[in-house]
Image (cartoon, rainbow, N blue to C red):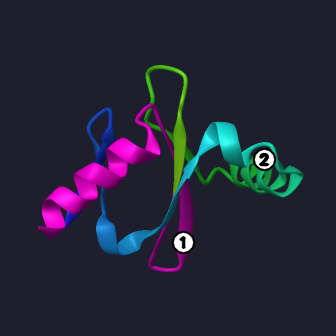
Amino acid sequence: MYLHLGQDTVVRTSSIIGVFDLDNTTVSKHTRSFLAKAQQEGRVVNVSAELPKSFILCAEEGVQRVYLSQLAPVTLLKRSRHFLL
């Protein structure tokens, strides 16, 4: 199964490690450090035409990627559940 993250970007649901709310998680210095390191390493993919609301951590073939999405985590959860039902 695949999950649409926005801007014509889809990922395999089996590769998703977590979906995180940017407003709530970036309060932590550890999350900010993780995202900064991922950005420096070129592992961040911005699929948002607007201000991102969430980030999705995926791992496929041993490579981790961080997708920035304009969709809220709740919206992504609803989309993923829709496919599971």
Q: Quadrant of residue 75?
A: top left
Q: Position of residue 23 (x, y in %)?
A: 66, 36
Badge 2 density bin: few <14, some 14–19, many ≥20, Cα 10 Å: few
Badge 1 density bin: few <14, some 14–19, many ≥20, Cα 10 Å: few
Question: Circles 2 and 1: CB distance less than 8 Å?
Answer: no
Q: Is residue 41 above or below residue 50?
A: below
Which mark's residue is nearer the viewer, 2 or 1?
Answer: 2
Identify which residue is drawn at 77% across, 57% down. 34
Q: Position of residue 70 (x, y in %)?
A: 45, 31
Q: Position of residue 22 (x, y in %)?
A: 63, 41
Q: Name the side, left or right, on which 6 lies relative to 73.
A: left
Magenta segment includes 64: yes
Mark number for residue 45?
none
Secondary structure beneath label 1:
strand
Name the N-terminal-most of marks 2 and 1: 2
Say which residue label 1 marks.
63
Span colored in magenta:
57-85
Q: Is residue 27 above or below residue 7?
A: below
Toward the right, the furthest residue is 29
Viewer-proximal residue among 80 and 50: 80
Tag count in the figure? 2
Viewer-proximal residue among 82 and 10: 82
Identify which residue is drawn at 68% across, 43% down. 24
Question: Which kind of residue does numbered mark 1 sit on?
Answer: Val
Say which residue label 2 marks.
36
Identify which residue is drawn at 72% across, 50% down. 35
Mark 2 and mark 1: Cα distance apart in space: 17 Å
